Image: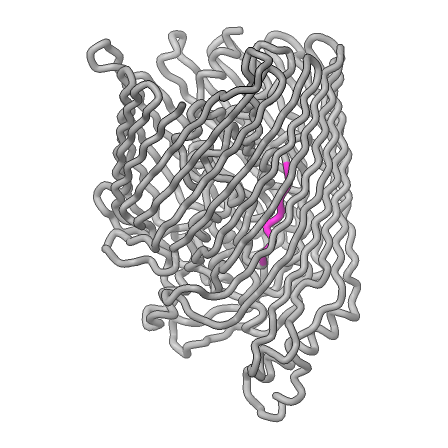
Amino acid sequence: MAYIKRIQHTYLLSPLALLISGFLSPVVLADDNDLEVIEVHGHTQNKHLSLGSSEAMLSHLGVDFSAAGGVSNLPILNGLMGDRVKVLVDGADLTAACANQMNPPLSYISANQVAAYKVVAGVSPVSAGGDNIAGVISVNSISPQYSETSELAWHSGYVSAKYSSVDNGRKLGVGARIASDTLSFDYQGAFSDANSYEDGKGNKVLDTLYRAQNHSLTGAIRDENQQLVVKLTHQKIPFQGFANQYMDMTDNTSYGAIAQYKRSFENSELQGQVNWHSVKHEMGFFSKEKTGMMPMKTDAKDISTQLKWRLTLDKNSSLLLGQEYYNYRIDDWWPAIEGSTMMGPNDYININNGKRERIALFAEYESQINNKLWLNTGVRVERVNTQVDEVQAYNDGMSMMDMGSMSTMSTANNALAANDFNNADRDKTDTLVDVNVLTNYQITLYDELQLGLARKNRAPNLYERYSWGVSNMASTMIGWYGDANGYIGNPNLNAETAHTISATYSKTAKDDAWRVSANVWYTDINDYIDANIVRNFNSYGLANTTRNILQFTNVDATLYGAKLDISKSIYQSKQFGEWLLKANVTSTRGKRDDTNQPLYQIKPLHTELTLSQQIGGFENTLSWEWVDSKSRVDVNRLENQTSSYNLVNLSSKATFNALTLSAEVTNLFDEFYELPLGGVSIAALKQNNSAGFTQLAGPGRSFNISASYAF
């Protein structure tokens, strides 16, 4: 048990170690009943202290983010972004229903709603989720709590608020629960509102304002052997700026329902889940910070079922069998603009009755072979079918061709492209086979070695495969990269296949005073979906305003990296409390094999040093973050280089029984820096095109205060 204890008290672990600790750690129970309520590494005891997006908590587990909207940044694991990262919200697989991925899965849950979370980069077990090559992020808000009496009565609640000066940001979170020993009802709500933030020079970073609210209502019932949970969700985002996209979000309204059932038998456990999620999404323009007049609309639904049956083979091993079904439907159209000869008279049908259907079967074996060796291995087979119906351009282009304008010829190309697309095969099927082997070897009581091997696959998403428009305007509406380029789909794309090896060595002091963990990983990807240049365009006619039109294509790629984590208790006394020092260094590289060209949005060398003090109910933290200059860039996407920068943050938190107060200063020295994963600022270009496509700047100094009262 000494080994398990050390894992539980360690939080600076590699992704593989995080996974293993999740398997080896004791299950967190709702109470003393035998029925388990699954909680994983990253359990938040005081979730009401976190507000807004879940980005901050996930960053501590090695997740990077590609800049997007204020609540919609896209996660990156081991240099891979977008749909290559599987994100599960309460076990449900939600799809970004937007050509720019403005509504990714993590945007549908606020930090105060998260009860547990985990991140497994690269080598993940087949049961964690398929159709990904980067890894799995899982956030869970379903955590029923019960009382010890049969009477349904008040259980707990909280109210939290936060203010940030850099963007005049206001965040509010509320929660309330009533419960008995068999029933639990829980409400969680969150509201965020922020203006566009200022950079380190005091200039407004245009089009970074947003407003969002999330609500959830959860009911649970149980007995000694089973539990049923039903959760209802609603989100409303009336506006959200996207500085590095040509358009903004003008509405995102969603409703969802999840039903989870768990039953324990003598030697097995059954778990089933049904998910439904519907979203109506609109893009357009709402602010003087970025103007325009083109509307775009999306209606989409995710429906999925999951069934898992864990069989206990003996006291040290088990077999998990699973079946999953996912059905995603989407309609994406751009309404005609009255009186416009270019954007009319028809609606532009971008994706018509799009369908992405997945059927998966998997088997996973897990065993504590002896006191030193643990093993997890599995196989997952998945069938992915994609289809779309016929599409149409704004017009046939004939009347405008007589005018002989360049924009007209672009429209005519769309008409021809729509005709070619409608005559082509639009029904595609991919078969994905995932295999993993994960081992943990206890060398000594204080030394551990973890090894992981995996073959993982991802089928193309609907936009990669079916974005048919070829004009400058149509193609620049496609893409979630924030690079201002245009993208054309490719119906003949193959599924990506990644082979990953990961190794982690960790050593702990005999008295638990320090811990060192070193992780290295290597990923070889066949049929990586990248993009090749079709042509370039220049809307402003300046030397620094050229962009490219690219088409998605399969290439081979290689990524590799290393991470070093150190944690040390440096001082402890009754008078000055406990002082803890943490440090980490992360390095990631990625390239195309055919050209040796760097892949897009690979974060440069990154280090972080944190000194914390805890004494009684007070906690103080000083952190220093250094990011190296970004010189390895994707020339096809005209990616900008960025300079190195330092950020210093200072925070204090005080807890007085049920009341928690905190104050922090982020970017203490108000340093100006450009986000290496931020993309370019299209909003700034529209205001003043003389500077060209400049990199999106990060926020300047911010004074933040927050308060939370639990009752």
Q: Residue at x 72, y 51 (%)?
A: 356
Question: Would residue 298 be seen by someone viewing this image from the given angle?
Answer: yes
How many numbered marks does the figure carry? 0
Residue 28 visible in this rendered orientation of the protein: no
In-image side of 665 versus 18 (left or right): left
Q: Position of residue 222 (x, y in %)?
A: 66, 19
- Indicate whether 659 appears above or below 108: above
Q: What stretch is highlighted in magenta?
A: 92-98
To which quarter of the image does residue 190 belong? Answer: top left
User: Along the line of sight, which residue is nearer the eye, 72 or 225?
Assistant: 225
Residue 313, horizontal then vertical, whole percent:
76, 13
Horizontal arrangement in the rendering, residue 100 relative to residue 239 (left or right): right
The quarter of the picture where residue 312 lies is top right
Tell me how the rendering is colored.
one colour
Left or right of 162 in this view: 311:
right
Report the residue at 75% width, 16% height from top: 268
Q: Is residue 689 magenta?
A: no
* Coordinates of residue 558 in the picture (x, y in percent): 57, 45
Q: Which of 188 and 483 is in front in this view?
A: 188
Q: Name the magenta segment's main secondary structure.
A: loop
Residue at coordinates 49% horizontally, 61% vertically from top-left? 637
Quadrant where the C terminus lies?
top left
Query: In the picture shown, does residue 640 fall above or below 699?
Result: below
